[in-house]
Amino acid sequence: MCSIPLHLTSLESGQVKSNVAVASDRYWLVFAQQGAKTEPRTSSHLQHLRLHQQKRLLLSLGHELKNPLTAILSLAQLLWQQPLSSEQQDYLALIQRSGWQMNRLIQAWQDYTRALWRELELQWETVELASLWLRSQELAEHLYRLSAPGWQWQWHIDQPLSHIYLHGDPLRLRQIFAHLLGWLMLFPGDRYGLRLSRWQNWLVLQLWEEGHGIPLKDHDRLLHECLEDYAEVTMGLMLARQLCRLHNGELSFIAQADSSSEWTVLLPFAEELPPELPTTAQLILVVSNDAPWIMNTTAALRHNHYGYIIARHPLEALDKLEQLQPTAIVVRPASSLILADVVESLATSSFTATVPLIILSDEAIPLGLSGFVQRLPLNSHPSLLIDVLDRWCFPRLAPPAPKGSLGRPLPNQTVLRLGLGHQINLPHLRLLEAEDLEQADLLIDIWRPDVLIWDLPADEVVHLSNHPKLQQLPIVTLTEESSRAIHQLGNVAVFPCLNLEDLMEVVLLAATVKPQS
């Protein structure tokens, strides 16, 4: 829009009329043009622009570093043609090795940046696993100088690799396994193995070693930072994970210090896999950074034919949730992993409303999560988690048991029902009934029940905190409102049962949890 002042000529006094402009009046001619609407720049958009600038800076900096490095390597090559003393040859060899190492590190850095922003183009082909495995070992030896010429790695492989085909970029697939082999061979163990299976729509390759493991201090950083003493190899691991994600797969690991480690690679397959390959339809996302608990839990999951993928950070959990869309999520916070941070991260995904979430914690579950949420005590045995998965999350894994096949409960198994809001039937159980919290408190001292059924309105939950003896029992809830309210109290084992036909099974499952002391 613009405006221009109009300077009108003075009129003779005889012609001046009340409706005619005079020189003392000021008028403006205004021109306006409709402009395109512009949306305000949101903070997220500005953050995206900042990240984009950082990415371009990293890529350009890598390119600029390569220029002087190429000159140094070329000069070193020329110096080899000159007569040199043995000491000079040693120094020149060191310069050349360091130069090539830096060159590989910069290349991995640039590839990682492009892969992170999904700007690395893949040449999709059908790749046979047997050939890929051999060529990956050759590439690892070339990149990391791991072995003397002619030396062969000894691997225990549980399935033939021939006639198994992957769908992906051959070069990038070789890089994934070469970087993993580079890490495994950096700290030689006693035994190495490769295990194959199918989890949902992925071919799963698990590379394991026994005898070394990974120090606990490195678990949280290994796929997210360059470790000081192993920059090149850990940069390779970061690149390997991003390359897996570009192939619509994932990478994770489990490990114990001075013991063992296992790397799990999920990749798309090109043709139908052999029928003898172990197969599971369930993939569990395990969010925790407690190494001993992870090892015990994943062993139980594998034994019961569940697939698993590990996340140790809230954002990593969100990435793997969106990338893999697992059939259940198990969260066990410990040390630096804070439950509220994990919940806040997962709540940003709409997928959490459709997938069962099991939280092992003694603290209250933060608000913000929708969908099925089950809370178990922090130190629950892995067998209890398996029971929850088998009976609640995936009841089709086993054929339905005939009615009455649960077996007669132990005679001393006692259930305390608090409130009379629903009509329930629990044959063969010793069932006590209390109309209010005070009456329930008296009964618990006399009968010492195994399970409490909450059948009061949800607004009565606030008074439960005044009765610590009741809070120590596993609590079966019959409405979603009561379930959420009791979850917020913290330090309570809650077992929701929204279908009264399943009440017997839920009560028997809750009875396996020992009352908290």
Image: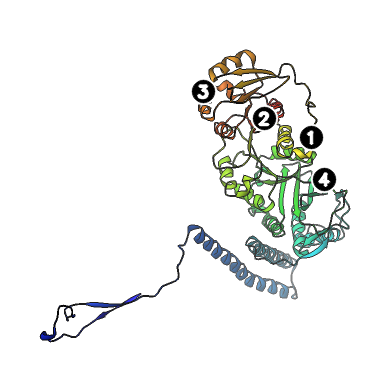
Q: Which label was assigned to residue 400?
A: 1
Residue underneath mark 3: 466
Label 2 or label 3, whichever comes before in sequence order: 3
Q: Which type of secondary structure does the marked residue at label 4 adopt?
A: loop
- Residue 337 appears in which quarter of the rendering? top right
Residue underneath mark 4: 190
Query: Is the residue 432 above or below the residue 118 in the image?
Result: above
- Type of residue at label 1? Pro
Q: Is residue 130 left or right of residue 489?
A: right
- Type of residue at label 2? Leu
Q: Position of residue 176 (x, y in %)?
A: 74, 58
**In whole angstroms, how far apart are the C-alphas of marks 2 and 4?**
54 Å
Mark 2 vs mark 1: in front: 2
Label 2 or label 4, whichever comes before in sequence order: 4
Query: Is the residue 5 above or below the residue 221 in the image?
Result: below
- Type of residue at label 4? Asp
Label 1 or label 4, whichever comes before in sequence order: 4
Mark 1 vs mark 3: in front: 1
Q: Is residue 102 left or right of residue 264?
A: left
Mark 4 vs mark 3: in front: 3
Residue underneath mark 2: 500
- Type of residue at label 3? Asn
Q: Residues within 10 Å of mark 4 (few under 14, many from 20)?
A: few
Q: Residues within 10 Å of mark 3 (few under 14, many from 20)?
A: few
Q: Residue at image x 79%, y 47%? A: 208
Label 2 or label 1, whichever comes before in sequence order: 1
Q: Position of residue 211 (x, y in %)?
A: 79, 43
